Each structure stands twice: as C-alpha cells, then as structure tokens.
Amino acid sequence: MPFILPELPYDTSAFGDLISAETFDYHHGKHHKAYVDKTNALVAEDGALADASLVDVIAAAKAQGNKALFNNAAQIWNHSFYWKCLTPEQQSPTGTLKSMIEKSFGSHEDMLAKLKEEAVGHFASGWAWLIIDGDNLKITSLHDADTPVAHDMKPLLTIDVWEHAYYIDYRNARPDYVDALLKQAINWEFVAQNLDGSGVSRADQ
Ligand code: FE2
C-alpha cells in the first residue's frame, strides 16, 4: 500500500500569524507531500518493501545504505510527528510530564531555554528533539532527515529547523520561530502521550 500524506489535525489558518496558512500550504502541501510521493516511487522500485511499514522502510533503507529512500521516508515520519506536536490552543505540561521536566531540567522555563538553544544552535537543516532516556528527559538534535526511529530513541517533541519551516513567516529569524512555537503552539497533551508510547501508534507509521 502506498504511503498517504496525513491530514493536518487543525485548520491551516488556526495559528494566525504564528504559523501562516501559506506556510502550511507549502510545508505540508508541498514539502511533506513530495517526501510521500518520492518514497512511494522509490518503494515501487523495490518489490520487497511493497507491504512494509514506514518504520520498516526506514530501517531497510538505512541497512542498505539507500540514502534517497532513507531521507524521504524519514522525512515522512518526522513531519507526521511534528504536526501532532503543534496546537493552536495554549497548553502547559501537567502531571507526570511536568514532574519529569522539573526533575530533568529544574523547571519548565529551563527546559524551554535548553530546547531553544539546541534548535537555534543546530547548524543548517535538521530537527531538535525532546526525548525520554530511561527515567530522564533529554534534549538533542539530528541532522537533515535523520530521525529518532533510526536510533532507537523515544521522541516526545520535535521542532523542525529546516528553513522551509519558518522562512515564509520569519525569514531568517530562526530564534523568533522557535520562541513562538515553544511559548504558544506546543501540544503538551501529545507530548505527555508519548511518555507511554500512546501518542504515536503503529498505524501512524
Ligand atoms: Fe519540514
């Protein structure tokens, strides 16, 4: 079965100027769609992967050294995860997630500052990630299309720092884009669901 571009979980105009409809039209409607289309075309060339899940395609592409397939398939996974990390509602971490953030970073504000530092400091294209490692939360980043799925990492939250994520609304001001998302657009309910793995089901992948 070919992979399908997932619907966004909100209207493209829901974020106003924070993330414009034009950004969603390009980022989701063109960039993400292109990753889906290219992955499907590359998978069609290899009959062995016809019924493989996205996670299995990523693993096979990595094992085979097939960079084109790896990059496109990993970008499907990363973007599908990223859309779910965003919400037009104003939310804050609660419960177990809040406690873990305070244990690992001191405070919610300290965690946001560290995540912003990682996202802004990441050289060129890539993704900043909040992950769970044992009982602790950690912040890291991966280059280009690389994905936690290929590293056995458990992601809770990501910020896309490719220029296509912010250039329409923020031009080259990556710090402003990261700041705006972290303070006003993070779906902390989804982040909490990822603590126990319920946020991303196998069917999503
Ligand atoms: Fe992106």
Image (tube, grey):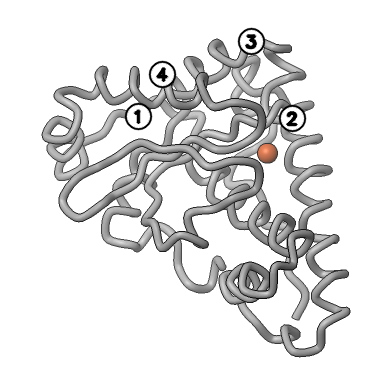
Dots 4, 3 in contact, CB < 8 A: no
Tag of residue 164: 2
Q: Secondary structure at mark 1?
A: loop
Q: Is residue 156 left or right of residue 93?
A: right
**Residue 54 coordinates in the image, percent (x, y):** 62, 70
When the figure is inspected, residue 1 is found, relative to residue 105, above or below; the finding is: below
Mark 2 in CB contact with mark 4 (< 8 angstroms): no
- Going from N to C along the chain, the mark reached first, 4 or 3, is 3
Q: Earlier in the sequence, mark 2 or mark 4?
A: 2
Instruction: Give how far apart the Cα atoms at labels 2 and 4 are.
Output: 20 Å
Earlier in the chain: of badge 2 and badge 1, it is: 1
Question: What amino acid type should be assigned to the residue bearing mark 2?
Answer: His
Residue placed furthest toward the front: 65
Residue where numbered disc 1 is placed: 91
Ligand 1 closer than 8 Å to label 2 CB: yes
Residue carrying label 4: 183
SS for dot 2: helix
